[in-house]
Image (cartoon, rainbow, N blue to C red):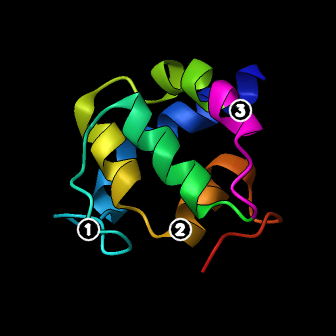
Amino acid sequence: MIKGLVLGIAVAASITACATTGPRGRTGNQLTGTCAGVCDHYIECKSGHPEADRSRCLQECPEVFTDDDSRVGYESLTCADAVEYVDGSQRSART
């Protein structure tokens, strides 16, 4: 868990360099910079939309994304990248 958290923080610090700006193309929602927005993006992108993952996401989000910029960066990711960031490359995202 600690290794994953450290890796998550390192990736979160560089995530804005990989992200696009502006509203999310998939739904047109504005980027929020909040953990609720991060988790909405993750759940919407994940195959099957597993609502059970929302509470885990909301609990871990403040530890991984410590500022508005990193949260906006995550919300800007494509679905494939958003799911891979959280679950690793073996999980499938909604396309």
Q: Amino acid at mark 1?
A: Gly
Tell me which segment is drawn in magenta.
Answer: 48-56
State which quadrant residue 52 falls in: top right
Q: Residue furthest right?
A: 90
Residue that badge 3 annotates: 4
Q: From this viewpoint, is residue 65 visible?
A: yes
Q: Residue furthest bottom?
A: 95
Q: Which residue sits at x=46%, y=20%?
A: 62
Q: Amino acid at mark 3?
A: Gly
Q: Amino acid at mark 2?
A: Cys
Instruction: Please indicate whether residue 55 sits to the left or right of residue 61 in the image.
Output: right
Q: Mark 2 near mark 1, Cβ–Cβ under 8 Å? A: no
Identify the mark nearer the N-term, 3 or 2: 3
State which quadrant residue 60 falls in: top right
Where's residue 47, x and y in %? Answer: 73, 65
Separation (CA) of disc 3 from disc 2: 20 Å
Q: Which residue sits at x=73%, y=20%?
A: 2
Residue that badge 2 annotates: 79
Where's residue 55, x and y in %? Answer: 66, 25
Instruction: Please indicate whether residue 56 sits to the left or right of residue 17 in the image.
Output: right
Of 48 and 79, nearer the camera is: 48
Which numbered marker is on residue 75?
Answer: none
Identify the mark nearer the N-term, 1 or 3: 3
Identify the mark nearer the N-term, 2 or 1: 1
Secondary structure, mark 1, is: loop
Residue that badge 1 annotates: 28
Secondary structure, mark 2, is: helix
Separation (CA) of disc 2 from disc 1: 14 Å
* Disc 3: CA contacts within 10 A as few (<14), some (14-19) or many (>=20): few
Q: Is residue 51 magenta?
A: yes
Q: From this viewpoint, is residue 15 visible?
A: no
Against 68, residue 37 (above or below) is: below
